[in-house]
Amino acid sequence: MIHFTLKYLCNFQIALPLQLIVLLLFFLFLSFPSSTMGKKSRVKTQKSGSGATAVVSPKEMMYLISELLQKCSSAAPSAGKEWEEYIQIRGLVEKIRKKQKGMSVMFEGHREDYFSDLMSWAQENGAACDGFTVDNFGTEGYGLRATRDIKAEELFLWIPRKMLMTVEAAQNSVLGPLYSQDRILQAMGNVTLALHLLCERADPASFWQPYVRSLPQEYDTPLYYQQEDVQLLLGTQAVQDVLSQYKNTARQYAYFYKLIQTHPAASKLPLKDSFTFDDYRWAVSSVMTRQNQIPTEDGSRVTLALIPLWDMCNHTNGLITTGYNLEDDRCECVALQDYKENEQIYIFYGTRSNSEFVIHNGFFFQDNAHDRVKIKLGVSKSERLYAMKAEVLARAGIPASCVFALHCNEPPISAQLHAFLRVFCMTEEELKEYLLGERAINKVFILGNSDFPVSWENEIKLWTFLETRAALLLKTYKTTSEEDISMLEKPDLSLHARLAIQLRLAEKQILEKASANGRAKRLHFQEKLEEGAALPRYEESDIALLENADADAKLPIILRKLEEVEEEPERPLQEHSRLLNGDKAVGFYSNVFATC
């Protein structure tokens, strides 16, 4: 039996070079004239399930869409102007949403009304789901409740391939003709899944109707925030990703609206008569919070998929327990721990920060042992010792400029960041020792090992730098931690405002811990220097540190991947989406829709 680990993707990924994407975008923008050009404008009225109506001129709508596309495709704003651009884009989107009011597809009744159909559909199509049911867990939203005792590592759930919504299924659907002619869809499987989901939602006879009807009608990602909620994130590290997420979603919506209205291959799409921004925001959020990578049928490559029923599981700390069984061609999940009857069944989404959870999943995980904030560091090319420092870093496999991470737990810095800071603070003589000195290779080998300082002075310098840098970053926030804690005590705080403030506070607390840790380390090594303590010496026998080492800092730098350069990427409280490779989520929205 061959098992593949699933990989959750939280951000729309770019698969084509940026220059090609830009050319494609403007080529397609200019190549497909408005369908109303040269024709008399007609007014269309469409009713939604709620009975509301909207009257909109196709010509007027196309004008607004073109204006939005142009605004979202313009050059990136200068530093400090991102918020102003966001306000302008949001203003255009709100104009479009107002014109489209009442045109979105809405299912009658409540979401929970369709859960029994979902379970029946799953059983009829070969899924194993007799050990649990879908239930409401209050603040955590809907999840899976055990209907019997389940043992740890017991295989309790599997979903066959035919139930999965995949890119391949989209290619063989009504979306196929457009997919075959559009380079953007071919390059971005997640976009294809979003449009496929909308097409299936619009088809009452769709095989996936029981699944589509079970999805939330709204999400808690920042795409659904009010402007004042987004404003609470100003000054945070997360805000740039939030603003980019909104801009890229708006840009892609405008592009595909124009494409669907004008391209001959889209003439039979159900979206042609009704494709609102709210529809697209819903589809993008559904995919963003749920999509995973699975192997193709022959196992030669991976593809993207939505996995019905399994995606109802909520998140907790633990290990990855889901994989793909190629032999039986199904997604399989084993129990993370023992579950008693009536207990909620959880899975682990992966080592994701709360910034990723909030932006891409719509929830904040209070006990997140993997929370972290990014810190960008680099050796200045104008520095006299730049060439020497860059060479030592290169030998250690570290770029001279890189995005690292400060962690919420101890130690706050990883082996990679420790190694970088040591080189960053080296004197010329110390650099020569690591380039030309005796056993220079061995010294580079242990640069990230906390047990073997370069010198007491070097350790004092690097921890002083970290203490100061973290303190400076704290000053960029508009509120203090105490003020945030006070705000969170307000009972009338909206959910989205609460998520924004929780994230803002979590960033500060990590920086505060890093600064305090830097100060403690600095004082510790100052004592060592004043005492005249001898430096620990690396011996060949110390290679034993590589085996069964518990502390990350003991691992030699060249045997570890540079985790800090990863952009993880990835579901609201109701059903958090999950990261199944346990390590990294490919950016789903950090560069989302940058292709159009």
Image (spheres, rainbow, N blue to C red):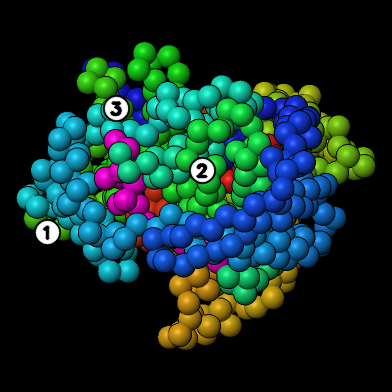
Residue 448 placement: quadrant: top right
**Whether residue 299 is situated above or below residue 278 in the rendered picture:** above
**Whether residue 457 is situated above or below residue 594 in the rendered picture:** below
The reply to whether residue 338 is in sight is no
Instruction: Describe residue 464's horizontal placement relative to residue 562 as left or right.
Output: right
Where is residue 245 shown, x and y percent of the image? 62, 52
Where is residue 364 shown, x and y percent of the image? 45, 62
Of the two numbered discs 1 and 3 in the rendering, the one whose residue sits closer to the viewer: 3
Image mark for residue 342? 1
Mark 3, residue position: 161
Residue 231 placement: quadrant: bottom right
Quarter in which the N terminus is drawn:
top left
Question: Given the image, on which type of amino acid does mark 2 rest?
Answer: Leu
Residue 151 placement: quadrant: top left
Marks 1 and 2, the one that precedes in the sequence: 2
Cα–Cα span, label 1 and label 2: 42 Å
Marks 3 and 2, the one that precedes in the sequence: 3
Cα–Cα span, label 3 and label 2: 26 Å
Where is residue 199 shown, x and y percent of the image? 44, 40
Question: Given the image, on which type of amino acid does mark 3 rest?
Answer: Arg
